[in-house]
Amino acid sequence: MSSPRSLFQTVVGKNVPRDAREDAVDGLAAARATTQLRLVVVMSGLDGRYRRRALNALGQCRAKNELETLADDRSLAQPLRERATELT
């Protein structure tokens, strides 16, 4: 299995195929790499599908602290904050 750092780099890489990015988010969830998943959620400029997938992965990991932090983050888009609240 790849390291969380390597998986994170795959998710945010510019020239990485969609499937590889989605697999990397899933890999972060499997590794319970909640810090990296939270960073994906807050990363501006990243396609929303990966941000939402990372947010849902945090819910699967039962990462309550990260989800609460995201729910309170006013810099995050309202739909993502609402979803974070739903997942807590």
Image (cartoon, rainbow, N blue to C red):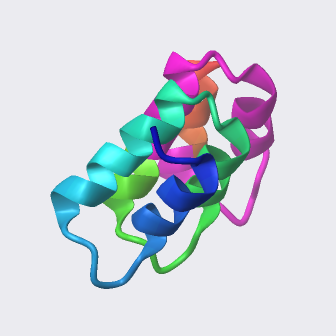
Say which residue appears at 73% left-offset and 45% top-offset. Answer: 35
Camera-side residue of 43 and 25: 25
Q: Horizontal placement of 22 versus 85: left or right? A: left
Q: Is residue 46 above or below residue 69?
A: below
Where is residue 65 drawn, in percent x and y? 81, 28
Say which residue appears at 20% left-offset and 63% top-offset. Answer: 18
Q: Main secondary structure of the magenta part?
A: helix
Q: Is residue 34 visible?
A: yes
Camera-side residue of 45 and 86: 45
Q: Horizontal placement of 37 versus 16: left or right? A: right
Where is residue 43 drawn, in percent x and y? 59, 69
Q: Is residue 58 above or below residue 38?
A: above
Camera-side residue of 30 and 38: 30
- Residue 24 in magenta? no
Range covered by the magenta-colored residues: 54-80
Say which residue appears at 62% left-offset and 57% top-offset. Answer: 5
Where is residue 52 drawn, in percent x and y? 41, 46
Say which residue appears at 42% left-offset and 45% top-offset. Answer: 25
Residue 1's quadrant in the figure? Answer: top left
- Residue 71 in magenta? yes
Q: Horizontal placement of 36 versus 2: left or right? A: right
Q: Is residue 77 visible?
A: no
Which quadrant does the C terminus fall into? top right
Where is residue 30 drawn, in percent x and y? 48, 26
Camera-side residue of 76 and 4: 4
